[in-house]
Structures are given as structure tokens and as C-alpha cells.
Image: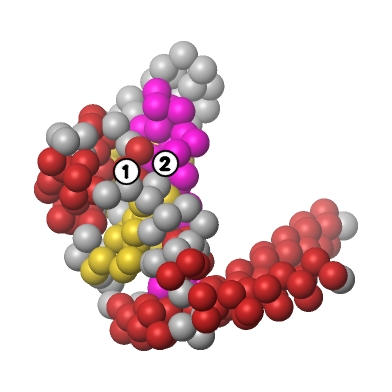
């Protein structure tokens, strides 16, 4: 009875996951649009997807940076492995390191159990750093080491954990200017921007407006 209940729950969650993935897939295809610039971005996604190159996606808020990152993941050999999002704009500074690398029980006040970090959870898959320009200088240094060495240490632990991940980052900031302002590490910037993709705002690709309007009309009219 317990086994049947567990199997039913697994199938329910799997079905929910597949429905969400299908919706995301449809929206990702939509966001490519009909404009020439989005056609070029679509071609670039298909070229860079099968590689393991690190990608930096830039563009204003709402331009579809996460949808493009998911499209890259789906076009990669890692598409059956996890796609883990790290929202750098909402994570609390003093807990960011724990969220990223995990922590061991008792490593700080409130650490009542060992926690697996986002990088460990994404092992074999892709990590998407949304608004990476918001992370602090100290975390930038630790993230750089993780990217270079492909290994991490949980907070409060000396044990090294090997990770196999692809990194995609996105930002609405001008990271080159942030480097000049000494708020973003230059070495991390070049590590992230191996393949840069810039998504222009909708006002610069008006050919996509009717497509989007029709999509949302059908979606919410239901």
C-alpha cells in the first residue's frame, strides 16, 4: 500500500513537472519571435546549446532572459538533468553562500540540518544565475573558484565536493561598467561572458508584438 502510494505521488509530481516543462517550452518557442534579431538569437541558441560553453545573457527586465536560458538547456546534452535557478536579486546576503554551496548541521545559528546547495543539486545539469550583477564581492570570489575548479565546500565543512555543471548567467546591468566601478570582478566577468547574448527590448523588435498579443489573448481568454 505504501509503495503504491509513493508510486502514485511520483507519477503525479512527474506529470506536473512535464506539464510545466511543456508550458515553458511553448513560451520559450514564442519568445524567439519573428523579428530578424530574435531569429539570430534563436540560431545562436541552437549553436551554443550542444556545447558546454558558459553563456551571459543581457537585457532589460522582462525581455525573456530565463526563457532563452531554458532553451539553451533544452538544446544541450544535459537536457534530461536538472535546470536550477538561482535568483540573485531575492536571496538574503548572509544566506546566499549557504543557498549556493550548502551547509552542514551546526555550522551557524539556525543550521539545524545539513543542506544541499543549488550547485550540488544541479550536478550534471545547468545552473542559471538570474541577475548575477547583484551578488556581493565576497561571494563573487567564491563563485569564481567554484567555476574554475568545478568543486565546492559546504559552509562549515572542509570536505570538497566535485560538481559537473553548466553555467548560464543573466543580468539587466552593464557588467563592463560594474567592472570599471569596482563592484564586479573582472576575472569573473570574463569567465561568465564566454558566449554573450543580448536580448533587445520589445520596443526594438515590434514585429514580435502581434505574436505576443495573440498568444496572451488566447492564454487568458480561456
Q: CA distance from mark 1 to mark 2?
A: 8 Å
Residue 85 lies left or right of residue 7; in this view the side is left
Q: Residue at x 35, y 38 (%)?
A: 134
Pointer 2: residues within 10 angstroms few (<14), some, or many (20+)? many
- Badge 1 marks a residue whose secondary structure is helix
Location of residue 154 in the rendering, given as x and y in whole percent from the top left corner: 34, 35
In reply to whether residue 188 is colored magenta, the answer given is no
Residue 101 lies left or right of residue 65; in this view the side is left
Q: Residue at x 34, y 62 (%)?
A: 57
Q: Nearer the viewer, residue 45 or 83?
A: 45
Q: Which part of the image, by quadrant, shows the N terminus?
A: bottom right
Location of residue 105 in the rendering, given as x and y in whole percent from the top left corner: 45, 24
Q: Which part of the image, by quadrant, shows the C terminus?
A: bottom right
Q: Are marks 1 and 2 in contact (CB under 8 Å)?
A: yes
Q: Nearer the viewer, residue 41 or 111?
A: 41
State whether residue 110 is above or below residue 221. above
Quadrant position of residue 10: bottom right
Q: Which residue is mark 1?
A: 133
Span colored in magenta? 71-100
Q: Nearer the viewer, residue 23 or 125?
A: 23
Residue 118 visible (yes or no): no
Amino acid at each position: 500500500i505504501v509503495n503504491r502510494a509513493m508510486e502514485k505521488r511520483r507519477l503525479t509530481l512527474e506529470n506536473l513537472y512535464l506539464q510545466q516543462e511543456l508550458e515553458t517550452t511553448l513560451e520559450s518557442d514564442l519568445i524567439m519571435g519573428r523579428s530578424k534579431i530574435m531569429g539570430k538569437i534563436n540560431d545562436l541558441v541552437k549553436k551554443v546549446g550542444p556545447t558546454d560553453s558558459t553563456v551571459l545573457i543581457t537585457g532589460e527586465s522582462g525581455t525573456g532572459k530565463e526563457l532563452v536560458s531554458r532553451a539553451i538547456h533544452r538544446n544541450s546534452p544535459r537536457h534530461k538533468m536538472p535546470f536550477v535557478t538561482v535568483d540573485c536579486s531575492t536571496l538574503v546576503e548572509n544566506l546566499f553562500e549557504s543557498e549556493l554551496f550548502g551547509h552542514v548541521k551546526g555550522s551557524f545559528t539556525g543550521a539545524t540540518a545539513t543542506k544541499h546547495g543549488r550547485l550540488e543539486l544541479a550536478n550534471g545539469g545547468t545552473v542559471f544565475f538570474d541577475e548575477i550583477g547583484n551578488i556581493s564581492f565576497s561571494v563573487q570570489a567564491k563563485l569564481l573558484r567554484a567555476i574554475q575548479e568545478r568543486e565546492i565546500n559546504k559552509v562549515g565543512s572542509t570536505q570538497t565536493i566535485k560538481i559537473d555543471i553548466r553555467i548560464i548567467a543573466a543580468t539587466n546591468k552593464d557588467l563592463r561598467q560594474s567592472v570599471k566601478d569596482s563592484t564586479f570582478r573582472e576575472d569573473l566577468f570574463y569567465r561568465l561572458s564566454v558566449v554573450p547574448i543580448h536580448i533587445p527590448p520589445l520596443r526594438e523588435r515590434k514585429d514580435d508584438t502581434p505574436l505576443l498579443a495573440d498568444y496572451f489573448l488566447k492564454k487568458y481568454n480561456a
